Amino acid sequence: NAGVTQTPKFQVLKTGQSMTLQCAQDMNHEYMSWYRQDPGMGLRLIHYSVGAGITDQGEVPNGYNVSRSTTEDFPLRLLSAAPSQTSVYFCASSRRRLKTSGREQETQYFGPGTRLLVL
Amino acid sequence: AQSVSQHNHHVILSEAASLELGCNYSYGGTVNLFWYVQYPGQHLQLLLKYFSGDPLVKGIKGFEAEFIKSKFSFNLRKPSVQWSDTAEYFCAVYRNYGGSQGNLIFGKGTKLSVKP
């Protein structure tokens, strides 16, 4: 298994440009999420998805769109990049929680990250 | 507000010193607890996790953490650190909202620098 993969590794954008950060996982995980990591802020959840066709907002969703047409892919779109979106972006995936009792393996597996610089 | 607090932003230790990084969370009810590590230039890796059972959890590379429910804490410890432990450490709490999908909430991280 390749695990969680992200492309590109590094990107420079000008203010107002658009781009899509790609994320894919080959573990058949239903839950996928996007975080941004900023110095002193930890990781903050942008958007997440509990399965194909289902997405929801996290803590900092403004300026980002997502879609989930397949289980494997969860792209993050910046429609009009702003310098405040300069950050490192991590995609993560995990098994969806089952509605049964007992232990749940909610470990999230992270991708290698995309470093984005918006000028 | 729901939060995860890590007490120290930056910890500097000499090799062989003991380590304890604090983590407190503000949720009631059932939580799953994690510590992730991020080595310089790398992505997050799971260090250890707690779901239920023995509150003393052992992870990789000699790390352990103790869940103290009454204190809402999940502190990370290592008896003797090595230079290779230099990294940033993140505490995270997964909260399940009564059967629906919850989310992982991260603390702001603690940078550990180990001097050789």
Image (cartoon, coloured by chain):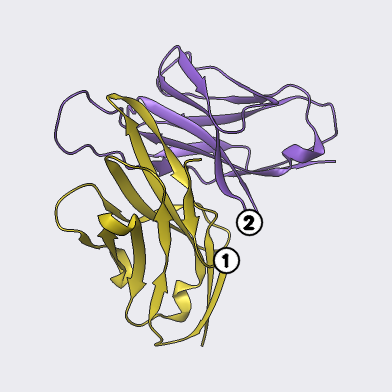
Chain colours: A purple, B yellow
Taking A26 as reference, is B30 left or right?
Answer: left
Identify which residue is drawn at 51% across, 40% down. Answer: B1
Q: Is residue A117 above or below residue A28?
A: below
Three-letter amino acid code of the residue under disc 1: His
Taking B82 as reference, is B12 left or right?
Answer: right
Q: Position of residue A59 (x, y in %)?
A: 56, 33
Question: Which quarter of the picture shows residue B61?
Answer: bottom left
Label 1 near label 2: C-beta < 8 Å? yes
Q: Which mark is residue A49?
A: none
Identify which residue is drawn at 54% across, 17% down. Answer: A67
Chain ID at mark 2:
A
Q: How many marks?
A: 2
Q: CA separation, marks 2 and 1?
A: 8 Å
Q: Which residue is mark 1?
A: B9
Q: Which mark is residue A40?
A: 2
State the residue in front, B6 or B18: B6
Three-letter amino acid code of the residue under disc 2: Gly
